[in-house]
Image (cartoon, grey):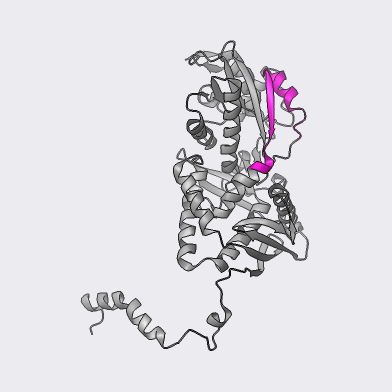
Amino acid sequence: MSEENGVKNPAPKKNVKKIVLAYSGGLDTSIIVPWLKEHYAGAEVVAVCTNVGQNEDLSGLEHKAKASGASSLHLVDAREQFVRDYLFPMLRSGALYEGKYLLGTSIARPLQAKIQVDIALQEGADAVSHGCTGKGNDQVRFELAYKALAPQLVVIAPWRLWSIRSREDAIDYAQAHGIDLGSISKMNIYSRDMNAWHLSHEGGDLEDPWNRPQEPLFHLTKSPKDAPDRETEVTVDFEQGIPVAIDGKRMGPFELLEAANRLGAANGIGRADVVENRRVGMKSRGVYETPGGTLLYTALRELEMLTLDADTLHYKQTAAAVYADLVYGGKWFTPLREALEAFMLKVSEHTTGTVRLALYKGNLIIAGRKSPFSLYQKDLASFGASVGYDHADATGFINLYGLPALVASLVHGKGKK
């Protein structure tokens, strides 16, 4: 590959004439449009932006995309679909990557890639493109979705082709090509990703894991020290593992998540500082704000403690870790993830009930839980007399349950003096 205008000049693949680009209007995709036009001579670039609740003013996005060289912009409102078909099933599974990350960016990519592929097929495009860097996870997530849904499409990943190696380089390229970057500058260098579930922050001073995130970094959640000096009590109703109401008011999925986000954010809920293992082999540091998701995850776990028997609960927790790895690694459209979804649906058929939470300065306090399918029986759990339980039965149980330990002790001489 030759160097031209500071970027590598890739040879055209398969006579590409139309490229559908996953477009956000941010730094990376803003410079990709002219770059594609330069390096795939004569190709038409169609931009696709999927609204998954990024809470941005998208009214000027079409003008911006066309000003950069795109022929058109497809703006798809997928907020309800995102919450209903992606976020809430993931919530029901209990997926939590490496015990901390609520998978906010990870879970949006399969839907965004699917909509992009659907439009590429509709437009008769030859190729799809994305703005993911060669160091990140998102390139894996987008491209695994492409392979699963439309493997015939050529994939163009500029960050793996050009010589731009930093956000500073990208800003220089944009300025050289007269691209309006809005508030993006070399002084405002954080990389952020937002959707209905969370807001992530990476880069800048966060690249040193010793640096504490400073308060101006956070955009969604109130600092716990500035949160109300009183408890906020809230109830969440679930049906078969899916939240359906807050404080007794039934809502649609997106409306409910927005309500949970407002409650969590106002009370300093949902901040996570995570050093995680990326799929490409390196560790990275991200700071995440997931107020509503944290609230809903906590409530659902408490309800499951009431409605699931021990074997099922423990196995679900094991399966949830596998589910989280699949989502994080971009394997949404795979047989294993789909099979796990069927398991989660079955195992949650009795996860119906209400959980009461008290929110206070970053804390989620469990204030109560109830379910018509509760396996908690007060008379059995009580230290008093119980119908159907004879204390004397425990002697035989312990003898049999401890038999392997007894045999090992005798064989190995531990029980001899």
Relative image position of residue 310 (x, y in whole percent): 47, 68
Q: Nearer the viewer, residue 82 or 363?
A: 82
> Measuring 65% from the left and 48% from the top, which residue is drawn there?
213
> Does the stretch in magenta take in 288?
no
Relative image position of residue 97 (x, y in whole percent): 52, 50
Image: magenta residue range: 57-81
Give the quadrant of the C terminus. bottom left
For residue 276, side relative to residue 190 (left or right): left
Q: In terms of image quadrants, where is residue 234?
A: bottom right
Q: In terms of image quadrants, where is residue 241?
A: bottom right
Q: Nearer the viewer, residue 23 or 355?
A: 355
Residue 115 in view? yes
Q: Is residue 113 depicted above or below 122 in this figure?
A: below
> Measuring 64% from the left and 52% from the top, which residue is drawn there?
293
Relative image position of residue 128 (x, y in whole percent): 55, 24
Q: Nearer the viewer, residue 321 or 376?
A: 376
Residue 164 in view? no
Q: Is residue 210 depicted above or below 25 in this figure?
A: below
Total tally of numbered discs in the picture: 0
> Does the stretch in magenta take in 69?
yes
Relative image position of residue 39 (x, y in whole percent): 56, 14
Q: Is residue 333 depicted above or below 290 in this figure?
A: above
Q: Nearer the viewer, residue 168 or 201?
A: 201
Q: Is residue 120 depicted above or below 79 in this figure?
A: above
For residue 360, side relative to residue 40 (left or right): right
